[in-house]
Image: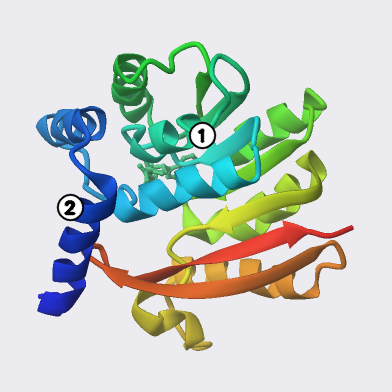
Amino acid sequence: ELPREWVAVDDYVSEVLLGTDAVLEQTLATNGDAGLPSIDVSPAQGRFLELLALSMGAKRILELGTLGGYSTICLARALPKGKGKVISLEFSERHAEIARGNIARAGFADVVEVRVGPALESMRALLAEKPEPFDLVFLDADKDNNPHYLAMAMEMVRVGSVILIDNVVREGELANAASDDVRVQGQRQAIELMGKHPRLRGTVLQTVGDKGYDGFAMGVVVG
Ligand code: SAM
């Protein structure tokens, strides 16, 4: 049971800043009907992703962990009309199929590419393509592999690119060095890599809301 005011504030933010959003609501309904877990970013966080991408003028965005495409649609909304690209990597063929439907209904079929497979393999394949640098990378797949994803992402970015990692705080477990949860250990390693990486300047923001107590790590490429 979440503290009542966490939910109340998210409700208030939805009412005053987010408004009704038929596309995202339909996406959640479709995901629910298909039995997908509701582990997408919250509406306020989705708007945050959109605004972050918008504020930096992102044209090339890489996402790891598509699920039903909720965050993917939020990110795609920040692209200049008819330009740019979101590549989203997803392990599950079924999730990818549902996401592609949602993304097409949202009007982004031509700018979003969902690639299916284990993200470690997809990232290797992507690296081999020597892609143009990504402006924004959002890590939201299997958290235990985040140190690897972060290291690989660093090969596909430029000065000023942003790397955002979701679900790093995990109800405070991030601070528990003795945690036996591989996701906690993965996040700790990723953040420690961010901290000592000569090309990254980073921070962690703790969050509360209708998805509980968690947080994002953010790194900006500075060299
Ligand atoms: N970003 C989504 C959103 O906010 O709408 C939520 C992503 S959900 C937290 C994590 C997703 O990562 C799941 O769909 C899961 O199938 C996928 N995933 C898990 N392990 C993966 C892997 N090794 N490679 C790629 N995707 C993976």
Residue appearing at x 65%, y 45% in the figure: 56
The residue type indicated by label 2 comes to: Glu
Residue appearing at x 70%, y 40% in the figure: 135
Front-most of residues 95 and 216: 216
In the image, residue 32 lies at what x, y percent? 14, 36
> Residue 29 occupies which quadrant of the picture?
top left
Q: Evaluate whether residue 49 shows in this view.
A: yes
In the image, residue 114 lies at what x, y percent? 48, 23
Q: Quadrant of ligand 1?
A: top left
Residue appearing at x 27%, y 47% in the figure: 18
Between disc 2 and disc 1, whose residue precedes?
Answer: 2
> Residue 99 occupies which quadrant of the picture?
top left
- What SS does tag 2 mark? helix
The residue type indicated by label 1 comes to: Ala
In the image, residue 197 lies at what x, y percent? 81, 68
Residue appearing at x 73%, y 75% in the figure: 195
Residue contact at pointers 2 and 1, CB within 8 angstroms: no
Instruction: Give the distance between the C-alpha atoms of the residues marked 2 and 1, in whole angstroms.
Output: 21 Å
> Residue 134 occupies which quadrant of the picture?
top right
Mark 1 highlights which residue?
Answer: 78
Local crowd size for mark 2, using a 10 Å CA cut-off: few (<14), some (14–19), many (≥20): few
Mark 2 highlights which residue?
Answer: 15
Q: Which mark is drawn over residue 196?
A: none
In the image, residue 17 lies at what x, y percent? 28, 52
Does residue 31 appear left or right of residue 89 in this picture? left
| Above or below, comparing residue 193 to residue 78 in the picture | below
| Above or below, comparing residue 180 to residue 47 in the picture | below
Q: Evaluate whether residue 141 shows in this view.
A: no
Does residue 214 appear left or right of residue 64 in this picture? left
